[in-house]
Image (cartoon, rainbow, N blue to C red):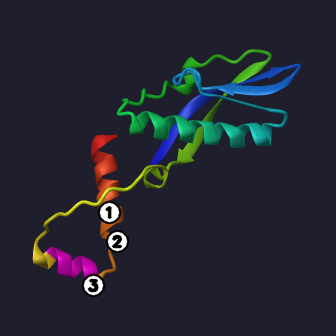
Amino acid sequence: MRYIYPAIIHEDPDGLWLEFPDLPGCQAFNDTLDALLSDAAEALECEIVESLAHGDTLPVPRPMASIPATDTSYPTLIRIDADLAKNTRSVKKTLTIPAWLNDRALARGVNFSKVLQEALVAKVV
């Protein structure tokens, strides 16, 4: 699932750091911009996966226009494609579907688990 949140990059004498104004406490620190953006994506993914695992509702990302720039800070967007299934334990579920649907899905090589996970994430997140 794709998530995009605004972040604020700050420059100071010790290096660069980044914060997500909609996710208090979610930050990244590094010396180079490339490394900072990579660390920010990892921090965002961890924050989202943990929040969802605890049943928390994710905040709606604020508009970029609402984040002011200064001489030492500027806004950016951080995007992640979080595979929520890889970050949690799996549980087995038994379900029933019509035979005709099963036959067509098998003929097309559908991965039932993946389809169910994607549908459930879309429904509950």
Q: Residue at x 32, y 63 (%)?
A: 115
Q: Residues within 10 Å of mark 3 (few under 14, many from 20)?
A: few
Q: Residue at x 36, y 30 (%)?
A: 57
Q: Residues at badges 3 and 1 in contact (C-beta under 8 Å)?
A: no
Mark number displayed over residue 115: 1
3 or 1: tag closer to the N-terminus? 3
75 sits to left or right of 31 = left
Image height check: is 14 above or below 92?
above
Residue closer to the observer: 58 or 7? 58
- Give the quarter of the image for residue 58: top left
Which image quarter is the C terminus in? top left
SS at badge 3: helix
Residue closer to the observer: 87 or 83? 87
SS at badge 1: helix
Give residue 81's position: percent from left, percent from top: 52, 50
Q: Is residue 27 magenta?
A: no
* Location of mark 2 (residue): 111
Please state which amino acid type lies under the numbered disc 2.
Answer: Asn
Please state which amino acid type lies under the numbered disc 3.
Answer: Ala
| In the image, farthest residue toward the right | 13
Q: CA distance from mark 2 to mark 1?
A: 6 Å
65 sits to left or right of 58 = right
| In the image, farthest residue toward the bottom | 107
Give residue 45's position: percent from left, percent from top: 55, 41
* Location of mark 3 (residue): 107
Give residue 32's position: percent from left, percent from top: 83, 37
Span colored in magenta: 101-107
Q: Residue at x 53, y 25 (%)?
A: 23
Type of secondary structure dominating the magenta stretch: helix
Q: Residues at badges 2 and 1 in contact (C-beta under 8 Å)?
A: yes
Q: Is residue 104 magenta?
A: yes
